[in-house]
């Protein structure tokens, strides 16, 4: 399914959701644009062990199944958040849950930075 909605600059997206505890913004690769999700794909939840993944093809974002998905099974993908204030806890319940919806590499870099500050 396609992740659809208006295309905004990152600044417009930040302003639109400035006082909200949630967004449906999806960042596009190699651009300063985001999609403000309005379609059904905006309601696919995060999981650290997802059954779907995202792919950007010619500026369009697609949610694709990683495996066969059973009827009535919830659709999920890894949000891999990359900006914000690092207050996006994950409670997906997966055995591999990393306790945050942020990108694992970004989370590791933030942890290293925090350790250096404490020294």
Image (cartoon, grey):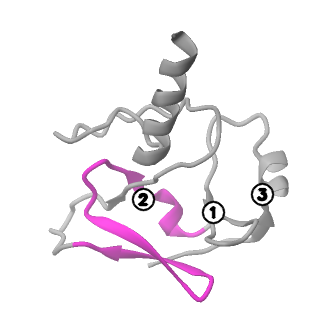
Q: Which residue is depicted at the point 21% across and 41% down?
A: 96
List x then y, in percent, for residue 69. 18, 70
Tell me if mark 2 has few (under 14), some (14-19) or many (20+) residues whose alpha carbon lies within 10 angstroms of its own: some
Q: Is residue 93 magenta?
A: no
* Mark toward the start of the polypeptide (2 vs 1): 1
The picture places residue 18, in percent across and down from the top left corner, at: 79, 39
Magenta highlight on residue 54? yes
Could you tell me residue 37's position as x and y percent?
62, 64
- In the image, is 114 to the left or to the right of 22? left
In this figure, which residue is indicated by the disc labeled 2?
44
Q: Secondary structure at mark 1?
A: strand
Q: Is residue 2 left or right of residue 44?
A: right
Residue 103 pos. (x, y %):
45, 48
Quarter where residue 34 is shown = bottom right
Quadrant in which residue 4 is drawn: bottom right
Residue shown at the point (25%, 63%) measured from the top left: 51
- Number of numbered discs: 3
110 or 31: nearer the viewer: 110
**Residue toward you, 119 or 61:** 119
Work out how far the residue at label 2 is from the one at label 1, CA to CA, in angstroms: 16 Å
Identify the mark nearer the N-term, 3 or 2. 3
Where does label 1 land, which residue? 27
Which dot marks residue 10? Answer: 3
Specify the farthest residue to the top: 119
Magenta segment boundaries in residue numbering: 39-66
Q: Is residue 40 above or below residue 78?
A: below
Q: Which residue does the image show at 57% across and 16% down from the upper left?
A: 117
In three-dimensional space, the C-alpha distance between marks 3 and 2, rounded to whole angstroms, equals: 22 Å
User: Do the CB atoms of the residues marked 1 and 3 lie less than 8 Å apart?
Assistant: yes
* Drawn side of residue 111 relative to residue 99, left or right: right
Q: CA distance from mark 1 to mark 3?
A: 8 Å
């Amino acid at each position: 399914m396609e992740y659809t909605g208006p295309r905004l600059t990152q600044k417009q997206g930040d302003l639109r959701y400035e006082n909200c505890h949630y967004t449906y913004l999806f960042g596009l690769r190699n651009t300063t644009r985001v999609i403000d999700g309005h379609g059904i794909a905006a309601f696919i939840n995060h999981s650290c062990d997802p059954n779907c993944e995202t792919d950007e093809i010619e500026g369009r974002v697609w949610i694709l199944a990683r495996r066969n998905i059973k009827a009535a099974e919830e659709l999920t993908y890894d949000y891999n958040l990359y900006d914000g204030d690092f207050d996006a806890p994950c409670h997906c319940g997966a055995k591999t849950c990393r306790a945050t919806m942020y990108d694992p590499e970004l989370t590791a870099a933030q942890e290293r930075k925090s350790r250096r500050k404490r020294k």
